[in-house]
Amino acid sequence: MRFVKWIRPVVLFPLLLVWLAIAGFGGSSIGQLSEVQENDSTTFLPVNAESTLAAEERAAFTQSDSLPALYVFDSVTTPEQFAEIQEFVADVAQADLGDGRTIGDALVGPATAVPSADGEAVLAVFPISADVAFERADGETLASVIGETMRELWQERNSATEGYLTGAIGLVVDQTAAFGAIDTLLLAVALVFVFVIHIIVYRSPILPFLVLGASMFAFALAALAVYYAADADLITLNGQSQGIMSILVIGATTDYALLLVARYREELRRHASTYEAMQYAWKQSVGPILASGITVILGVLMLLLSNLKSNQGLGPVAAFGIAAAIVAALTLLPALLLIAGQKSRAIFWPRRPRFDADGLEEVDKLEAVEERAGVWGKISKSVAAKPRRTWLLAFAGLAVLAAFMPTFRADGVGQDDFLLGDIESVAGLDVLREHFDAGATDPVQIVADENTWQEVVTGLQSVEGVSAAYAVTPAVQQGAPGGVIPEPPVVIDGRVAIDVITVADAQSQEAKETVALIREAVQAVDSTALVGGTAAVGLDINVTTDRDLTIIIPMVLLVIFVVLIILLRSIVTPLIIVLANVLSFAATIGLSAIFFNYVFNFPGSDSSVPLFSFVFLVALGVDYSIFLMSRAREESLRWGNREGVRRALAVTGGVITSAGIVLAATFAALGFLPILFLVQIAFIVSVGVLIDTLVVRTLLVPGLVDDIGRRSWWPGHKQIAE
């Protein structure tokens, strides 16, 4: 026995050394994740998307693809102002990129300054080579370097004329700056939220540091795995995926830690040895934690069924994060909790759990359990007293909110709505729309048969939202305005390229709607024609996401149902949990629609918001039902269904509610980033987790299982005590 007592603490130190090594390597990987990000939306689409096929054919008609940098100047009314802008354009072309090249070397055509028709604005167009724009230097794309350099040059002039960098390059710069906060602001806000809540939950100055330490070590492990996987092109990482991963790791590790710590504290009252208490707590917690983690992992991996590479990439990235959380919660955290050996009860100071050998029977009495549970003991009594009324009221409340689900608008938003707040590129788009045909700088691109192209151009004249359409001629290839010089079009392999100028700029939602009308008109004339361009890419992303919803959502539900059957050895209870979580999701979307439409006045939602919200909310929300019902089954085997559910609700109420609040607060940290997509995900998941925690897990599921009785555990119901 002396040998056993001696070997136990010694085994902990190699484990801690391994985690220190992981933190060392993983810590550097966190800062390198931005180097392996892929944020170009054109690479997200499947190879058979119409815009992708159109881009392949259009490549033969241009020497090099361009990514336009647009500098728009407002209130330009004097020759002196125009001359200053022309000097600026010349200075930009001579600006050094830091690698021996100038911005002029990155241009695929001449930079020009064009006055608006109303004589009140000027647009400077810099056609940057797309190949050069997406080169990387010192961890950022040259598109960002070029944009930042242009803004610095104009600011150095201290001009009274207002200038805005916008277009594709401007949006890249502002989006890069927004996502740059993921490594700093997002992590800091999330950790502060979690720390404050932990202080309130544990009422100990020591435990929060141990749990947060485990979370950060888990994040380092996840970052290490994701970095090398992305660097080897095994997965696609973008800024959104990285932000969601960091939140998932911190939130999941904290959830699993809360479950383990609560059970450990409970067992310290039953065991004199801290090692024996941890052994039993770990044994009873490993099942629910693994089931919960595996459910989330399998759920997010269903994103691999998506046709969008960005969604496909998020699946493995999120799975790496959850796996790291599981490993940290089941290895590192127990080691930290036992680091003081038999004196580890001091970790709970000032409320140390004490072992009382003479009072073990009293500890297990239902009255004692509910008394220790405080408010959750009172709730468990209330639910057990009137289970049917409880679940019916919960169901009715959720159903009312779910009725608003059809009002949720998720048909996509423009790039100008992607960023929130005072954003220069967005302000520039507003000026551009006011004074110019915004679509002229980034036209819709069509490839049609040489025998029908004239009919296609004629048909486009009547399409709402189209201001001009013309074939690509040799003069246009050299930079001349379209339709000005009368000459035959360029014909390659029997195909003709057509440019379509839209009233709306290519980054807007209106341009996507115009593309849909263009495709209808073109297909009516030439069934072989292909419509592409920036706006078409956005439309195809929306269409692909709609398809993904019909495939991925049923698969996620099926995976969760199967895992629950294996864990609970029942069919009825898993069915109750899955249906309850679907209702919870519908209620959450309904409530979100009310806030998005009437409180926040959002312009709409990206088409991927419902998909991501469903995957994360249902996969994460089912965790709390897993924690509750796995404990309910354990207690029901000994005490019977009614008392088992009552005990489970009492003993898990505090820890699950704490876990839900922590996860909701962690996801709420995403709302501090000025990115519409992440703000909406933050709201939906945070609110949904609270609904799952306080309504579904507290009232609906336990009330239903209590009301149904032993039959809720069918076909293993005979194992449940009478």
Image (spheres, rainbow, N blue to C red):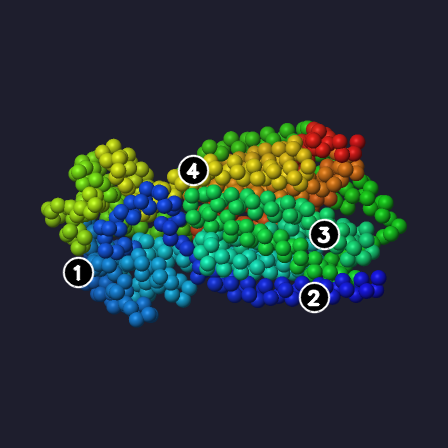
Name the residue that disc number 1 marks.
79
Say which mark, if any, is on residue 282. Answer: 3
Give yes or no for contact between labels 2 and 1 (Cβ–Cβ under 8 Å): no
Q: Is residue 370 above or below residue 38?
A: above
Name the residue that disc number 4 marks.
547
Circle 4: residue type: Arg
Q: Quadrant of residue 367?
A: top right
Q: State which quarter of the image contains the C terminus.
A: top right
Question: Which residue ends up furthest to the left in the rendered image?
Answer: 486
Label 4: which secondary element: helix
Q: CA distance from mark 4 to mark 1?
A: 53 Å
Circle 3: residue type: Trp
Name the residue that disc number 2 marks.
13
Q: Horizontal placement of 281 versus 116: left or right?
A: right
Pinpoint residue 126: horizontal percent, then vertical percent: 25, 58
Q: Horizontal placement of 247 versus 657: left or right?
A: left
Tag 4 or tag 2, which sits nearer the N-term? 2
Tag 3 or tag 1, which sits nearer the N-term? 1
Q: CA distance from mark 4 to mark 3?
A: 42 Å
Tag 2 or tag 3, which sits nearer the N-term? 2
Circle 1: residue type: Pro
Pinpoint residue 72: horizontal percent, then vertical percent: 27, 55
Label 1: which secondary element: helix
Task: State whether residue 413 appears in this view.
Answer: no
Q: Quadrant of residue 136?
A: bottom left
Q: CA distance from mark 3 to mark 2?
A: 19 Å
Q: State which quarter of the image contains the N terminus.
A: bottom right
